[in-house]
Image (cartoon, rainbow, N blue to C red):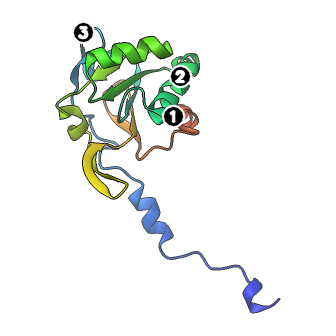
Amino acid sequence: MPKSAKPSKPSKAAPKKAAAEHHPLEGKKAPSLDLSDANGNKVTLKELTARGNVVLYFYPKDMTPGCTTEACSFRDNFDTIKKAGAQVVGVSADSAASHQKFIGKYDLNFPLLADPDNKVTKAYGVYQKKSLYGREFMGIVRSTFIIDREGTVRKVLPKVKVTGHTEEVLEALKAIG
C-alpha cells in the first residue's frame, strides 16, 4: 500500500474537542427564570419543572426564517416531545406582543417568553458577541437547554443548527429518561 493510502492517525486535538463540548451549566442547577409569556402571565422555572422536564430554547428573533423553522419543528414534534416527558418553552428578547403575533401566525402550541432586558439570556450565557457581514453586535446565540424535573441542566445544545435540531433534542430526552 502506498504511503499516501495509509489511514491517518487520529489527531491529538480530538480529546480537546470532546472536552470543549461540555457546557459549564451541564450537571448544575439551571439559572432561575421569571419571565412573562405572550399573554403577560408570569412563568417561572420552578412552575415549569413541576410539570416535567423542560426543553428551554433560546432564539434570536420572532418571524425570522431560522427561528420560524425551529419553532415550527418544535410545534410539529410537540406530541413526541410530550410523550418523552418534556415541554417546550422558547425565549427571546422580543416583546410579548411580538410573541403573540408569532404564535398566531404559525399556530405555535407552546409558550414563548419575553426577555427584553436579556437577564435570563445572560444568566444562561447565550447573549454573546455575534458578527454578521463584518459587523459585530451583541445578540442571542441559538441554544437549547434540557432541564430535568429537579431543575438540573442535563444537556446543553449550543450554537444550534436548525436542521435536525428537534431530533437532537429527542435523543437528549431519551438519554435522561
- Residue 89 spot, x, y in % from top left: 38, 22
Query: Does the CB distance between marks 2 and 1 fall below 8 Å?
Result: yes
* Gap between marks 1 and 3 measured at Cα: 26 Å
Q: Is residue 51 visible?
A: no
Dot 1 or dot 3: first in sequence order is 3
User: SS for tag 1?
Assistant: helix
**At x 59% / y 75%, what residue is drawn?**
10
The spot of residue 45 in percent (x, y) is: 27, 22
- Under mark 2, the amino acid is Ile
Q: Which mark is residue 41?
A: 3
**Residue shown at the point (46%, 60%) measured from the top left:** 18
> Which numbered circle lies on residue 155?
none
Name the residue type under label 1: Val
Gap between marks 2 and 1 measured at Cα: 8 Å
At 35% from the left and 43% from the top, the residue drawn is 141
Residue 81 numbered tag = 2
Circle 2 SS class: helix
Per the model, the C-alpha gap separating discs 3 and 2 is 23 Å
Residue annotated with mark 1: 169
Quarter that holds the N terminus? bottom right
Between 142 and 52, the residue placed more toward the observer is: 142
Name the side, left or right, on which 3 lies relative to 151.
Answer: right
Q: Amino acid at mark 3?
A: Asn
Q: Nearer the viewer, mark 1 or mark 3?
A: 3
Mark with earlier residue (3, 2): 3
Residue 51 at x, y = what percent?
Answer: 37, 14
Please identify the residue farthest to the bottom as the structure is shown. Answer: 3
